[in-house]
Image: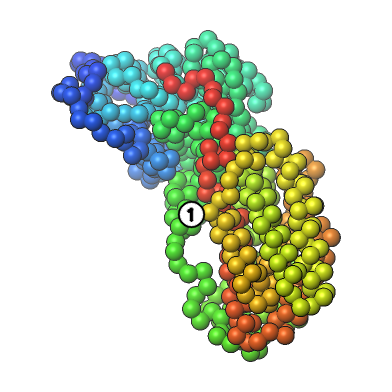
Amino acid sequence: MSSDPCTLFPAALPRAAAPDRPATRRPASGHPATGHPAPDRPAPSAPRVLSIAGTDPTGGAGTAADLKSITAAGGFGMAAVTAVLAQNTHGVSDIHVPPAQFLAAQLRAVSDDVELEAVKTGMLGTAEIIEAVRTWLSAHPPRVLVVDPVMVATSGDRLLEPEAEQAMIRFCSLATVVTPNIDELAVLTGEPRAHDEDEALAQAARWSEATGVAVVVKTGHLDSREVTNTWIGTDGTRHPVHSTRVDTTSTHGTGCSLAAALATRLGAGEDPATALAWVTDWLHEAILHGAELQVGSGNGPVDHAHRARRLAAAGSAAPWVAGGAVPDRWEQPAQLAARATADGPTGPAASVPPVGPWTEALWAAGAPLAGAIEGSGFVAALVDGSLPEGQFSFYLAQDAHYLQRYSRALATLAATSEDPAAREFWSDSSRHCVDTELELHRGWLATRPDAAEVAVSPVTSSYTDFLLARALGDPTAVGAAAALPCFWLYAQVGASLPEVPDEHPYAGWLLTYRDPTFVEGVRGALGVVERELGAADPAVRAEAARAFLLACRHELEFFEQARRVDAAAVSPAPALAGATR
């Protein structure tokens, strides 16, 4: 049994007969089979994408991975099977290759009935199979053709006979873009294996210029903490997309998945830069959570659907504060703390400790949400540096909108509070939002005008409207409690950070979370809220607790919102050559 984690094809296979006739050419207009004029119809709701590849019964690679990837990327997937494999997470134990005529029949069945936006090819395996696909593509050239040239395993083993390998090299000239691994790039170019990223990029650029086919250079097989997928356009244009390496064995089928998702995004009309950025970010998340699937004991699959499940959960309309979570009248601190810890997790200890029994009870109730923020995908990616720049820019743009509106809420608290010390604190904090905190944002966004012009999002608007409503329409204890999480939870994130290296792309912002001046401000906010709650009526105090918990959830949504938008929502990417053929 082979130990290679990707779909393998033995070097020697029974030769299949060539297809007995070429695929039928699609009529220029109308129904693909009859040519009758088609009624006016709206554009399809999703790009229709065909995968031409082998199978994997455990679902991690081949057509199984392709179909999951196409769906995850927003397309409707179809599959024509080149080979049927007996395979699991430890490798391939047997293989059956249907005659090339049968593959040709599958392809004709698709093109006789279905219009396609994109085609992705994976394991083709023999010269006869490659020729069958080439013949069909010549009769039905797709707008987008992504070729994953499966020739060399991740172990370095050659997977094709010499004749098939040469056929695959010629076949790649038909593609919109090819997605070889580092070893396959060497085979394509006829050069020695690249030892570093610069060498691989140079190889790809020379080959792309010679063939008129774009290349995605993937550095996942090189030894570096940072991994990069770079689109090499036919005009030499480069668009790198950076990510970080995940320490996992759940990488089975990553090459298949990237190519299929890329075909889908290109088929939907995205430019190469935007498509590759989306695919890289999606695949990083899929790899990061692959082991949690617990599929097999070898090299497991990635979790193609993790992003979809995350977004579905974010759309839930379930109430954020359940009925009974807060008493109608909060008479004693222990009433809230007991309800908070009775049925759920307790969450982390506060990095900036409460200053009295009322804020201690608030933390006990909100700590699970603090833990959710610390463990959120946005914070994790921000900390390890893998957060795409577009998402960070979106976050900063929203934070700029937030700070301007938050400063108004704090100014309102300064105007309505009866405590002179509280008035001074809220007033100083309001000025600090505009004069100090926004300055960092201006520096970043000044060089990214598209991000600076992003409008306020529904998440940001909902949060700031909530804060302003509490400050303007409720007793000051309620408004103060609603304003507290922005102080307290940011300090909590800062305290949980590891050492931030100087070269970290987001070091300037991470360090502000644990700046001593900011921590001192958190203590000031805690003191104000403790006094307000102590002096409040029990019914007002209960409403303040609800406002605090709702604001904690707003904070989680605020952090995570950047991971719910595509790169195109932040800024239009530059057009690159080689998007279509």
Q: Foreground: 402 or 19?
A: 402
In the picture, which quadrant includes the N terminus? top left
Answer whether residue 123 is visible to the viewer in this image: no
- Give the image quarter of residue 27: top left
How many residues crowd around disc 1 within 10 Å: few (fewer than 14), some, or many (20 or more)? few
Which element carries disc 1, helix, strand or loop? helix
Q: Position of residue 8 (x, y in %)?
A: 42, 32
- Relative image position of residue 265 (x, y in whole percent): 44, 34
| Residue labelled with disc 1 | 310
Q: Is residue 162 above or below residue 95?
A: above
Q: Which image quadrant: the C terminus?
A: top left
Q: Toward the viewer: 443 or 128?
A: 443
Left or right: residue 251 versus residue 525 is left
Residue 336 shown left or right of residue 7 in the figure: right
- Residue plotted at (35% across, 29% down): 117
Q: Where is residue 82 drawn, in percent x and y?
A: 31, 29
**Residue at image coords 75%, 41%:** 443
On screen, 331 above or below 139?
below
Q: Amino acid at mark 1?
A: Arg
Q: Is residue 538 left or right of residue 2?
A: right
Of all residues shown, which one is farthest toward the bottom?
331
Q: Is residue 147 above or below residue 481?
A: above
Which residue is found at the position 74% from the left and 75% from the top? 417
The one of 479 and 46 positioned closer to us in this rendering: 479
| Residue 370 seen in the current view | yes
